[in-house]
Amino acid sequence: MDLSIPEFKHSASLSPKWLEDSLNKLGCKFNNKIVSFPENTASGSCYFLEISPDISAFVVDLTLKKPMRFTRMPSEEDFWVVYYDISDGFNKHFVDNVKHKIGYTSKLGFAIVDSRTKSTYVSSVGERAFSLRLYIRKSYIMGYFKNSIVEKDFKNIFDDKKRKMVYYGHIDSRSNVQLFQLKSQNMHDSNYEFLLKGITYKIFGYLLERLNADMPEAGAFLEKDLLAIMNSQEYLLSDVLKPFPGVKALSKIANMSISKFQNLYLNVFGMSPASFFKNEKLRLAKELLESGKYSLISDVAYELNYFKTSYFSLQYKKYHGHLPKEVFKSKTN
């Protein structure tokens, strides 16, 4: 973490009082649920809404004009902070000094962090940061799983004397649809509150379904496992021009069995390592085709370790929906 970046420490709670207490220090104005930042700090706004006594929603829609670290201090209130981040670029989220890249292009846009755990959020300057954060009382969540077959998987997570919840993963497709709808709205519109309330209830429902389906695995998803998965991911993405290294090599980097690695990787990223690697390669292919640095499409294919241009073109079209020749810019001598 770059400690030279100015840090703003704040609290958080299910009521809006923390905004009034904290954001005044930044020169922000809090008026009728909307937080406005000083013009020299950021453009955009935030929106806080108490959905019910047990759930609150906090929407962040900002473009920072200067670097800043937002550090949420541990809370005495016992709740989860559930992050849904579809920012335009990469943001950094530090939990107990462990860095996680989040945002729409990072593939990790979903997180659950215990309110008693300190975390720091660092947005990219000049890029739109957009996230929905749900503050959900833990006792309320637990009520949905009383006497259910997954109740035992929650015991360690909800026991204050044991570990605190830290979980990262991909945003499910249904929540993504709701988030992009929310992102397209104006916070100052008269119907924004009703829209946010409806979207929050939908996303909360999807969250309950996800917890019910994934918690038997996620309950055992320790932070050291997440860190190991991310280490293997960094290696995987260090050079997407090379061939796929194989699950065996990646699981060795993560110091896990192949089966455990595959299950956890799928849980975090929503796809297999091979599929993720292929998608990243094809995303890079579009950049190379448009760069004007290659004389032939076959040159781009070979650069990406595709030895048959026809096969490369087929895979490219499956992913992007058009042939490489439609975006290719030939090198000019």
Image: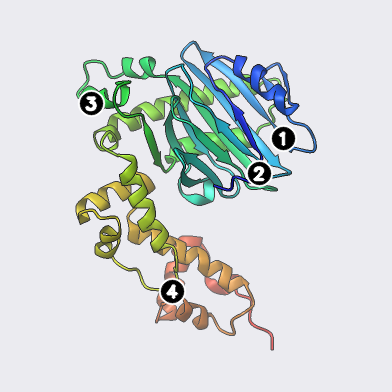
Residue named by callout 2? 128
**Toward which corner of the image does residue 147 lie, by quadrant?**
top left
Q: Earlier in the sequence, mark 4 or mark 2?
A: 2
Q: Which residue is mark 3?
A: 150
Mark 4 residue element: helix
Task: Assess whether mark 2 and mark 1 are in contact (beta carbons under 8 angstroms).
Answer: yes
Q: Amino acid at mark 4?
A: Phe
Relative to 144, is 122 on the left or the right?
Answer: right
Real-space Cα distance between discs 4 and 2?
33 Å
Q: Is disc 3 surrounded by few (<14), some (14 to 19) or many (20+) residues within 10 Å?
A: some
Dots 4, 2 in contact, CB < 8 A:
no
x and y percent of residue 108 in the render?
45, 46
- Nearer the viewer's eye, disc 3 or disc 4? 3
- The answer to whether 151 is drawn above or below residue 93 in the figure is above
Q: Are marks 3 and 1 in contact (CB under 8 Å)?
A: no
Write down the residue under mark 4: 312
Q: Is residue 136 visible?
A: yes
Q: 263 or 138: nearer the eye?
A: 138
Label 3: element kind? loop
Label 1: which residue? 44
Asked whether the beta carbons under mark 4 and mark 1 sit within 8 Å of each other, the answer is no
**x, y percentage for residue 49?**
59, 19
Query: By what rule are the colours in the image chosen?
Result: rainbow
Check disc 2 and give the amino acid type: Arg
Task: Rate crowding at label 2 as few (under 14), some (14 to 19) or many (20 or more) other CA atoms within 10 Å.
Answer: many
Q: Is residue 121 above or below residue 77?
A: below
Amino acid at pointer 3? Val
Q: Nearer the viewer, residue 205 or 34?
A: 34
